[in-house]
Amino acid sequence: MNESLGLGSLFLSSFLAATLLPGGSEIVFAGLLASKTVGLWPALGVATLGNTLGGLSSYVIGRVVPQKHLPERALAWVRKWGPAVLLLSWVPVIGDPLCLVAGWLRLNPVLSTLFMAAGKFARYWVLAKFVS
């Protein structure tokens, strides 16, 4: 597999993994690093970008969802911590609803994006340390 195909696959898997669709990008990320198909920094950048954009798609969906009832637990966390709660946007099961609720509550999009990207980058960084 060449580098551009590997990075394209990583982008797609990391984007889809951060949406409301099921999926995971960790295996693709770890596989590319372990096979030395791509370098650490390009892989971290592409995975973080794809995963952040996927999370932002949930944020945008939240902004257009009519003001109806959303899960109380997610609402409480996001109200309490604000955009900083999006550091947890990478966590399976809770990350997607947190992004959705952040959009629904109309949290600051710039801060939301920064916290989301920081959490997702940290997750991939830790995974890369286990692979290398």
Image (cartoon, rainbow, N blue to C red):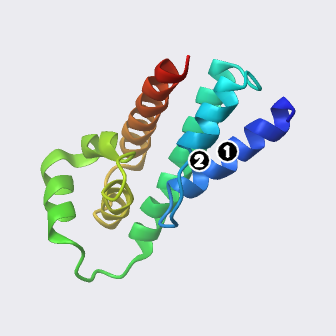
Q: Mark 1: which secondary structure?
A: helix
Q: Is residue 119 above or below residue 38?
A: below
Please identify the quadrant where the N terminus is shown.
Answer: top right
Asked if residue 127 shows in the view, the reply is yes
Please identify the quadrant where the C terminus is shown.
Answer: top right
- In space, the residues marked 1 and 2 are separated at their CA atoms by 5 Å
x, y percentage for residue 49? 59, 39
Asked if residue 49 shows in the view, the reply is no
Q: Amino acid at mark 1?
A: Phe
**Circle 1 is placed at which residue position?**
11
- As drawn, is 98 to the left or to the right of 62? left
User: Looking at the image, which is closer to me, 33 or 83?
Assistant: 33
Residue 64 figure quarter:
bottom left
Q: Is residue 56 above or below residue 42?
A: below
User: Looking at the image, which is closer to me, 37 or 105?
Assistant: 37
- Residue at point 41% right, 28% down? 122
Whether label 1 touches label 2, CB < 8 Å: yes
**Circle 2 is placed at which residue position?**
14
